[in-house]
Image (cartoon, rainbow, N blue to C red):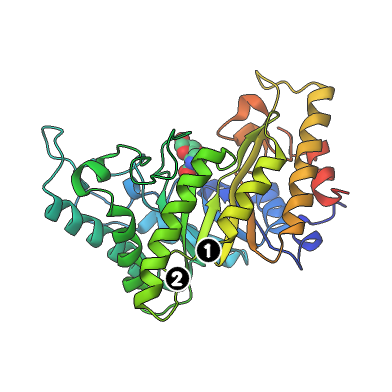
Amino acid sequence: KDLTPIKDVYQNDFLIGNAVSAKEFEGTRLELLTMHHNVVTAENAMKPGYAYGTYPEFDFTAEDALVTDAHSAGLDMVGHVLVWHQQSEESLHTDANGDPLPREEALANLRNHVKTTVEHFGDRVISWDVVNEAMNDNPPNPSDWKASLRNSGWLKAIGTDYVKESFLAAKEALNGKDVKLYYNDYNDDNQNKAEAIYQMIKEINEEYKAENNGELLIDGMGMQAHYNLNTNPENVEKSLEKFTSVTSEVSVTELDVTAGSDNVLTEAQEVEQAYLYAQLFKLYKEYAGDIARVTFWGLNDATSWRAAQSPLLFDADLQAKEAYYAVIDPE
Ligand code: XIL
């Protein structure tokens, strides 16, 4: 209870976030959430698959309740996510036989999904992850970003311009509201993947800038940062260099560091994990001018999506781990 709030340590650097479900908003978990964080992301609730009651009828009841809970607790909200190949409504781009819809139909569905969702939440969110995980892992020829795109339902139905079209629809729906638009992806420390993403954002932003008085279409790059004990901070820094050169901000959107197995973390593993967290936060501090937010993907090990590998700052009993102490004092 006498812990230093993480958000206070980094108040002059970047926002501190966490991922939540509706059940986080009570008791000790809520205390921990509001003590250490400025902002939350819905771990699942705001994904495209949950935007509909019976497709194509939108139903944002649960999402609205979550946003209200967050705001009542004094936490800002990140929108996650509009366009993704997982946890999405297949009918948006695929017909009953499993074949891609005709391009114009899928494009109309994409625009309608993005427009309706973005307009619904308005400026109740500070940013949107507009497109999530569009890139293949470790693409062999990263200078050709179009050839490096994941063969998703959206790509099959629309083609490579579905990425730009998603951002254009979100930008239009915002109608000038100050909500940042992000591209978000994992394995962000892999240099081939980072290069392909860099090329994609660069091209899309350059095209848009030329027609819009230097304004960017993709404001930010979201580095998910699902790391492990083999992650090399030098690669993370190389990626930061790339991404900051083509966006106006970068955020660390889903940070966790797996270590151990079967819900057991040895003392040595806990120390090693803490050391990586320290190295990462030293790096993030160096890039504080470019980094808007650092979000952990879950409050504690027991409820993490990778619970078996104890990836977070607080243990199953919500007690601070070595990783927490590393984060509040990385030097
Ligand atoms: C994960 C959630 O944490 C899990 O609860 C869910 O079962 C699957 O999705 N990249 C993302 C996140 O962008 O939305 C994912 O979240 C983790 C990987």
Point out which mark residue 247 bears: 1
Q: Using the numbered discs, state the Cα–Cα distance from disc 1 to disc 2 in whole angstroms.
A: 8 Å
In this image, 92 relative to 19: left or right? left
In this image, 159 relative to 9: left or right? left
Q: Kindly give the residue lying farthest to the top in the view shown.
A: 262
Residue 292, position as x, y percentages in the image: 63, 63
Q: Is residue 207 visible?
A: yes
In this image, 258 relative to 198: left or right? right
Residue drawn at x 36%, y 46% is 84
Please name the amino acid that badge 1 sits on. Answer: Thr
Q: In this view of the protein, which residue sits in the foreground, 308 or 329?
A: 329
Residue 159, position as x, y percentages in the image: 23, 48
Q: Is residue 132 above or below residue 70?
A: above
- Near mark 1 (Cα within 10 A), the count class, few <14, some 14-19 or many ≥20, is many
Please name the amino acid that badge 2 sits on. Answer: Leu
Residue drawn at x 43%, y 45% is 143
- Residue 120 figure quarter: bottom left
Residue 51, position as x, y percentages in the image: 32, 53
The residue at which mark 2 appears reads as: 216
